[in-house]
């Protein structure tokens, strides 16, 4: 365990990736959730996305959410943008960190934005130039990096091609999105290992989904390669396992619970994050998948009168 990073930088994506995949919730409730998350000690929060309201009605109030929250100076807030127009809106709203997204697989990219991956990379080059001109940074998220729901396997070479192009165009960081939970520890070791060989200085962020139950195992595989930047979603917000199109983000409190016990610091107050997860559960009105939300930290005591059965 001695080679693991001493500390992680976690990005809480529940307010964006989570709520984007839930039934719409009131603006005030989003503001309250972001304010609660801002007080947990998490260092980064993906607050909103600036997408066309007809495409994703859940994010139509991005400006109101952003102006409504109590910004914590210790937190870096970011916005996801699907295109140049979204980037302009985010920058006009005052964001200094944005994320652009492109799928490694052509089919997934066409389904999302009706463009090939190469065409989207051209768009992102213009977006990066705009962000830099306005004094902002832009991370490029490579979705379907570990597999595509339409095409199946995505060859690592394809991902490297996207990364090389984005970095050549000035990307400030790269994030790999495991969009439909197709990553496994061996695939993480291969793709992330190759990426670190090719770009040793790259700030690589990883975004895992727990769709097939390998989310935290994937995190562990990446930790062993020295990756220290991860996304997670409070309560596992954003994907009902029984719903079509479910995303199933890994739960922030489960990630914190695991790595802190391994001596890897997150800066996050676990009890505060569990409380925020309970709030998120109230907000969406359904049981969220986080098991640490259900069971509490591993040292939570059972009252003596309660039976504990089993071996
Ligand atoms: Zn996600």
Image (tube, rainbow, N blue to C red):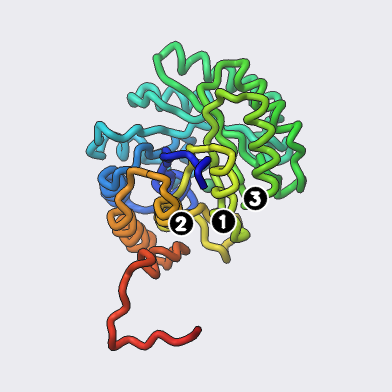
Q: Is residue 169 visible?
A: yes
Dot 2 or dot 1, earlier in sequence: 1
Q: CA distance from mark 2 to mark 1?
A: 9 Å
185 vs 180, nearest the viewer: 185
Q: Earlier in the sequence, mark 3 or mark 1?
A: 3
Residue 249, position as x, y percentages in the image: 51, 52
Of the pair 42 and 241, the residue shown nearer to us = 42
* Position of 145 relative to 290 (above/below): above
Does residue 66 lie above or below 311 as drawn? above
Query: Tags 2 and 1 in contact by the CB under 8 Å rule?
Result: yes
What residue would you read off at disc 2? 236
Q: Secondary structure at mark 3?
A: helix
Q: Which residue is mark 3?
A: 185
Q: Residue at x 61, y 45 (%)?
A: 178
Residue 38 left/right relative to 195? left
The x and y percentages for residue 131 are 46, 18
- Between the residue at mark 3 and the residue at mark 1, the CA separation in whole angstroms equals 12 Å
In the rendered image, which residue does mark 1 sit on? Answer: 210
Disc 1 on helix, strand or loop? Answer: loop
Where residue 73 sits, quadrant-wise, is top left
**Left/right of residue 222 with respect to residue 276 in the rendered view:** right
Q: Nearer the viewer, residue 143 or 306?
A: 306
Q: Residue at image x 39%, y 70%?
A: 295
Query: Could you tell me residue 223's position as x and y percent?
Result: 54, 43
Residue 22 seen from this side: no
Q: How many marks?
A: 3
Residue 102, percent from left and from top: 62, 32
From mark 2 to mark 3, how far is it between C-alphas? 20 Å
């Amino acid at each position: 365990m001695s080679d693991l990073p001493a500390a992680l930088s976690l990005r809480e994506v529940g307010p964006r990736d989570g709520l984007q995949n839930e039934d719409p919730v009131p603006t005030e409730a989003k503001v309250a959730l972001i304010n609660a998350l801002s007080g947990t000690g998490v260092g980064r929060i993906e607050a909103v996305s600036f997408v066309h309201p007809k495409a994703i009605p859940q994010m139509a109030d991005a400006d109101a959410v952003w102006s409504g929250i109590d910004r914590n100076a210790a937190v870096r807030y970011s916005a996801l943008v699907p295109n140049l127009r979204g980037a302009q809106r985010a920058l006009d709203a005052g964001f200094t960190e944005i994320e652009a997204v492109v799928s490694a697989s052509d089919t997934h990219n066409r389904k999302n934005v009706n463009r090939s991956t190469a065409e989207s990379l051209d768009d992102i080059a213009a977006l990066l130039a705009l962000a830099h001109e306005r004094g902002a940074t832009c991370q490029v998220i490579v979705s379907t990096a570990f597999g595509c729901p339409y095409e199946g396997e995505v060859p690592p070479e394809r991902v490297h091609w996207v990364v090389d192009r984005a970095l050549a165009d000035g990307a400030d960081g790269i994030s790999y999105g495991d969009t439909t939970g197709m990553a496994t520890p061996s695939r993480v070791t291969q793709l992330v290992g190759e990426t670190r060989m090719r770009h040793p200085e790259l700030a690589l962020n990883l975004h895992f989904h727990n769709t097939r139950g390998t989310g935290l195992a994937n995190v562990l595989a990446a930790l062993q390669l020295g990756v220290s930047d991860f996304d997670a979603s409070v309560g596992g917000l954003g994907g009902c396992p029984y719903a079509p199109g479910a995303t199933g983000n890994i739960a922030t409190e489960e990630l914190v619970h695991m790595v802190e016990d391994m001596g890897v610091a997150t800066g996050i107050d676990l009890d505060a994050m569990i409380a925020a997860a309970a709030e998120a559960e109230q907000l969406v009105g359904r049981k969220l998948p986080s098991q640490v939300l259900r069971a509490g930290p591993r040292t939570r005591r059972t009252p003596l009168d309660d039976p504990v059965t089993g071996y």
